[in-house]
């Protein structure tokens, strides 16, 4: 009898001054990912530079059972933010203790940072020549300190295959959901999001800073239009139709939509259509022409173009990966951030 597949091990590195919220993100997101048989898809463990208490930026410490040797067993290493990085943040160099800890990481291990955890990856040289992001308030300082890194201060997260970075705080949730989606498909990631009560998908290229995060009192929003679109993804959609749902001019609607979501209406619609196509590819045997029609792309050629641009693989390859794995699989590494762009029809 074939042995059960071993769960992917995620090791979270807890550093002094860490933010408890961000420390908990990998445990919450990866820990809720289950396969068709209900078994956990990830094993999540935490280590420090030494076993024992680790001070946080709150009024409590956490006790870590494992030392840095645990990093040698990881398939993925996650470095959350810390407010006490010392020379890492001030001079862009690792302490001897931190360098010795990171030396345990095996070649080929996937590396992930949340917020200013990216300073650790950059100081270790893991981000040289690669795209990366961090909290928007730290991006300028980050770029000055690490000129070899291609810093994008605007996006929620970057995906460069085996190295992924996120912006601040909640963007860590987006990145971890993106990893689950990349590893095991949209259905698994959406179920994790549903249980965590967070949006199932925000594109990596979505802006960190949205001009109007909360609508002003009595100010119309574009929420109703977005709900209207989700019920009609398979239909041709025009900006005039969307604007009409909110009784706005196209110009006002487009500006308000970008202020509220961080992306244009066209980018948002394409992203939702790609998400719908992913679900159909994973969960049905529908022919490509039907998947294209049901997801709103119209033709198999258009479906192929947008799925390839967003995911880095063809619809056929995507389906083969996840259907062959019984609903879970590992998607080939994309070429860059998952950003679906395009105008509304």
Image: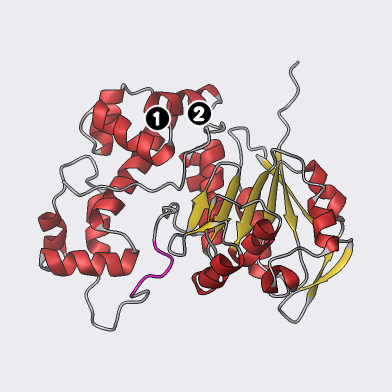
The residue beneath circle 2 is 322
- Is residue 210 within the magenta segment? yes
Query: What is the x, y in percent for residue 200?
Result: 45, 52
Is 63 a magenta residue? no
In-front residue for pair 80/144:
144
Q: Nearer the viewer, residue 227 or 105?
A: 105
Q: Residues within 10 Å of mark 1 (few under 14, many from 20)?
A: many
Q: List x then y, in percent, for residue 55.
A: 80, 74
Point out which mark residue 166 bears: none
Query: Which residue is located at x 47 percent, y 23 percent?
Result: 320
Q: Is residue 169 visible?
A: no
Q: Residue at x 26, y 34 (%)?
A: 294
Tell me: residue 171, above or below residue 70: below
Residue bearing mark 1: 281
Residue 341 position (above or below residue 95): above
- Please name the predominant secondary structure of the magenta segment in the image: loop
In the depicted structure, whether residue 104 falls above or below residue 122: above
Residue at position x 50%, y 28% from top? 322
Residue sitting at the far right: 51
> SS for tag 1?
helix
Left or right position of 169 against 76: left
| Sooner in the amino-acid sequence: mark 2 or mark 1 | 1
What secondary structure is found at the residue carrying circle 2?
helix
Quarter residue 68 falls in: bottom right
Magenta stretch?
Answer: 207-211
Residue 37 sits above or below residue 98 on the image? above
Q: CA distance from mark 2 to mark 1?
A: 8 Å
Q: Position of residue 260 (x, y in %)?
A: 31, 68
Asked if disc 2 and disc 1 are in contact, CB closer than 8 Å, the reply is yes
Its colouring scheme is secondary structure
From the viewer's side, name the closer residue of 315 and 221.
315
Dot 2, crowdedness within 10 Å: few (<14), some or many (≥20)?
Answer: many
């Amino acid at each position: 009898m074939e042995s059960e597949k071993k769960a992917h091990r995620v090791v979270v590195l807890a550093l002094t001054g860490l933010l408890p919220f961000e420390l908990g993100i990998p445990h919450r997101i990866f820990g809720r990912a289950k396969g068709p048989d209900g078994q956990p898809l990830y094993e999540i463990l935490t280590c420090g530079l030494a076993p024992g208490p680790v001070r946080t930026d709150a009024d409590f410490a956490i006790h870590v059972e494992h030392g840095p040797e645990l990093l040698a067993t990881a398939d993925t290493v996650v470095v959350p933010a810390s407010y006490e990085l010392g020379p890492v943040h001030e001079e862009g160099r690792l302490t001897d203790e931190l360098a010795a800890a990171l030396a345990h990481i095996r070649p080929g291990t996937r590396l992930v940072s949340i917020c200013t955890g990216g300073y650790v990856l950059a100081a270790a040289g893991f981000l040289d020549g690669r795209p990366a992001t961090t909290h928007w308030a730290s991006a300028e300082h980050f770029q000055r300190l690490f000129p070899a890194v291609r810093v994008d201060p605007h996006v929620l997260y970057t995906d460069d295959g085996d190295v992924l970075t996120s912006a601040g705080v909640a963007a860590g949730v987006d990145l971890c959901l993106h990893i689950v989606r990349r590893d095991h498909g949209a259905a698994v990631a959406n179920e994790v999001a549903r249980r965590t009560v967070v949006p199932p998908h925000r594109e990596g290229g979505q802006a960190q800073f949205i001009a109007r995060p909360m609508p002003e009192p009595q100010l119309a929003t574009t929420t109703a239009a977005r709900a209207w679109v989700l019920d009609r993804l398979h239909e041709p959609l025009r900006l005039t139709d969307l604007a009409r749902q909110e009784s706005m001019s196209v110009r006002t609607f487009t500006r308000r939509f970008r202020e509220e979501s961080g992306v244009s209406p066209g980018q948002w619609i394409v992203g939702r259509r790609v998400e719908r196509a992913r679900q159909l590819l994973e969960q049905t045997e529908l022919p490509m022409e039907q998947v294209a029609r049901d997801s709103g792309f119209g033709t198999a050629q258009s479906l192929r173009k947008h799925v390839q641009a967003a995911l880095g693989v063809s619809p056929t390859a995507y389906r083969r990966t996840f259907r062959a794995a019984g609903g879970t699989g590992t998607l080939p590494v994309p070429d860059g951030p998952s950003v679906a762009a395009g105008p509304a029809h």
